[in-house]
Amino acid sequence: MRERRTAVEIVFDGATKQYPGRPTPAVDDLSFTIPAGEICCLVGPSGGGKTTAMKLVNRLVELTSGDVRIDGRSVRELDETELRRGIGYVIQQVGLFPHMTVAENVATVPRLLGWSRSEIRSRVDELLDLVELPAVDYRDRYASQISGGERQRVGLARALAADPPVMLMDEPFGALDPITRTRLQKELLRIQGEVRKTIVFVTHDIDEAILVGDRVAILREGGRLAQVDTPERILARPADDFVAEFVGKDRGLKRLSLTTLGEIELDAPNGAVGPSAGAETTLRDALSLMLSEGSRSLVVIGADEQPRGVLTLDRLSELLR
Amino acid sequence: MTDGPVIPDFGKASSCVAENRLFCPDWVRDNWGSVLQPAVVQHVKLTVIAVAVGFVIAFAAALLAHRHGRFERPFSVFSALVYTIPGIALFQLLVPFTGLSILTVEVALVGYTLLIIFRNVLEGLRSAPPEVLEAARGMGLTRRQTLLRVELPLALPAIVAGLRVATVSTIALATIAAFVVPEGLGRPIFAALRDYFKTEIIAAGVLAILLAIAADVLLVLAQRALTPWASARRLA
Amino acid sequence: MNTFSGALEFIVDRRELLLDKTLEHLVLSGAALAVALLIAVPVGVFLGHLHRGSFLAINLANVGRALPSLAVIALGLGFLGFGFTNVLVALVILAVPPILTNAYVAVDGVEAEAVEAARGMGMTPWQILRRVELPLALPLLFAGIRTSAVYVVASATLAAIAGGGGLGEILFNQASYRVEGLVGAALVVSALAFAADLALGGVQRALTPRGMRGRVSALEADVTRAGTA
């Protein structure tokens, strides 16, 4: 079994990409840090340069000026194919090799790196289990024989195969139906809990960014950084009108979806009666419940089926201020 | 062109042959070893050499054109030009240079395979979906690795399709080779033409057709074996 | 090289003979093509319209390609004897497959959405065929006619062995015309084939609706693959 590699930090340092003949840069003086082991979502309007910025990391797009550093080393130092073999790359249409089985697809980078046959085999099985595609069923199937959601899981497994410290994901769930998309977003978070990679995740969907990201970087048109911070702080204190507009007028509600009932301080139950909800319910769903039941309070039920506390509308409002 | 007996040996002259009826099985039986089988073997040899050489040339040209697009037009035009020249004419035009030899025949036959193989190989190489190529590049495959491990395997169906057409066409065309050199299934046909001996014409002609069909079937089987993922899609 | 200059001399000196034979050649080829068109186009178009008989239509091209033209002409000679009409039959047999296959693939392959829209607008099947399917199918259909025409011109050189006349009569007659004559005739028949290809290519381009112009070469590639189901 190979040693697990620890995650590393990614630093954008004045990174700029200017295509010749275009009036403005695609990425303009981008500077921020992604701490090791975090998912950073790059969001922004179309043409905002988020995909370009991501591709600066694995040099699918070359820097015009400035630098991008992985674990302290500039991406320009390594030969580009070597660099890419150390970075997991997931794209929207997946790009599974149609002529290879699932197992062969996943094994691609380890084969390039010269792993032994048995190492590859056990690694493939391990990864297929990680993405919840039982190896015994899926190993020998072809891309044309599995569904879109399953294909993207294979894509994920393939990107993780050589245990890269860094992953780049370009709108990976964009081509899936909403139900599958939600499922895979949760899957990703679960997997991240197990493997802890540093992930750059591009999306145009602010809700996805808030759900998935430990950190969110908003790029405005022209590839300039508008704000980078945790989802909570961006929603609470948008840096300017553009960001406020981008996250939407319902940012207050969005903030509520970030926390569950079990995570906040509640008033004592005191035998209160009325509508109730479990501690794992988000504040947003709790608010929705209160409004539809016409109640100003909600009883929170713990895992032991006993009331843990009470949430009032006033308390909710306080939390948002 | 001198050739084998049109009428079998004395004393056993069958009436069928003497009356030049449509088809005399006993003639075929009697002359299989001396006339027909050698012709088939020669025919196969001519075809295999022509398709093999043609494939090497056209494949290399297609790889080049895939890498550097500007080579496509010249080669395409050249091979189309050769393809348009009628068979007998091409043979005749080569004779002053390469004489009445197998070389003349092979040069012409090779020439006719170039267009179809070139087109199909090139098209096959271009058929790889863009997202597959992007994933390959992003994963760190070099250009050469992408070509060998992704583009070429995916091009196989088109390549084999081109080989099928080229092989079948060459088998048909090789019958005319006998115009230049007494080889192949054209030889008995030309010989039989002098006396309009129907059985020999029909036997040789049918053999040529059967040979082509056999080659076609073999190549289809080869393609199925080489591309398991395409069959999977059919069943899916 | 003497042979070639000799061949050119031959062409100039015996131009009446060559003109004569070329005319015979064209008449034979043209007749065969015309008959083949009469047979193959309606059948192919109707099958394609009904989306029926794909196995037959596509494998017909395979079979057609496998038929050695020499054998077919020789067989025609064997079955039907000597003479123009008999060779004509053989040539028609050779000319039909590419036209039929292309006619089928062309009409069958018209975008389903276009046909669907036409049906939704209330066109009868006959109107759909005439106004939507045929115009869209024309480029590929014509590619097949062009392929067949060149093939017929080439095969007609063999017609001489069965009394069909044409430039083959010079090509097969080394005794009378010597090598220079044969090479000269070879040059003429090649030029004929090129001329036919270019002329029909021009017509094909003219027939291609402007919106589909860029895809013509892709269509041509389709033809060669269409025959390999």
Image (cartoon, helix red, strand yellow):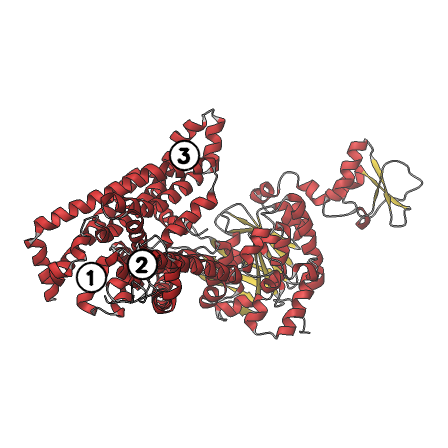
Which quarter of the figure is the C terminus of chain A placed in?
top right
Mark 3: secondary structure: helix
Question: How many labels sit on residues?
Answer: 3
User: Could you confirm whether marks 3 and 1 are on the same chain?
Assistant: no
Q: Is residue C146 above or below residue C173?
A: above
Q: Position of residue A20 (x, y in %)?
A: 38, 55
Measured in 3D between alpha carbons, the distance from the residue under mark 3 to the one under mark 2, in whole angstroms, is 35 Å
Q: Position of residue A109 (x, y in %)?
A: 57, 67
Which numbered disc covers residue B173? Answer: 2
Of the two numbered discs 3 and 2 in the rendering, the one whose residue sits closer to the viewer? 2
Task: Determine whether label 1 and label 2 are within 8 Å by CB.
Answer: no
Using the image as rendered, state which of residue A283 and residue C61 is in the foreground: C61
Q: Which residue is mark 1?
A: B92
Q: Residue at x 88, y 35 (%)?
A: A274
Of the two numbered discs 3 and 1 in the rendering, the one whose residue sits closer to the viewer? 1
Mark 3 crowdedness (10 Å alpha carbons): few <14, some 14-19, many ≥20: many
Residue type pointed to by label 2: Leu
Which numbered disc covers residue C133? Answer: 3
Mark 2: secondary structure: helix
Chain letter of the residue carrying label 3: C
Residue type pointed to by label 1: Gln
Residue type pointed to by label 3: Glu
A29 lies left or right of B174: right
A226 lies left or right of A287: left
Using the image as rendered, state which of residue B225 and residue A303 is in the foreground: B225
Which numbered disc covers residue C50? Answer: none
Q: Residue at x 19, y 66 (%)?
A: B95
Disc nearer the start of the sequence (1/2): 1
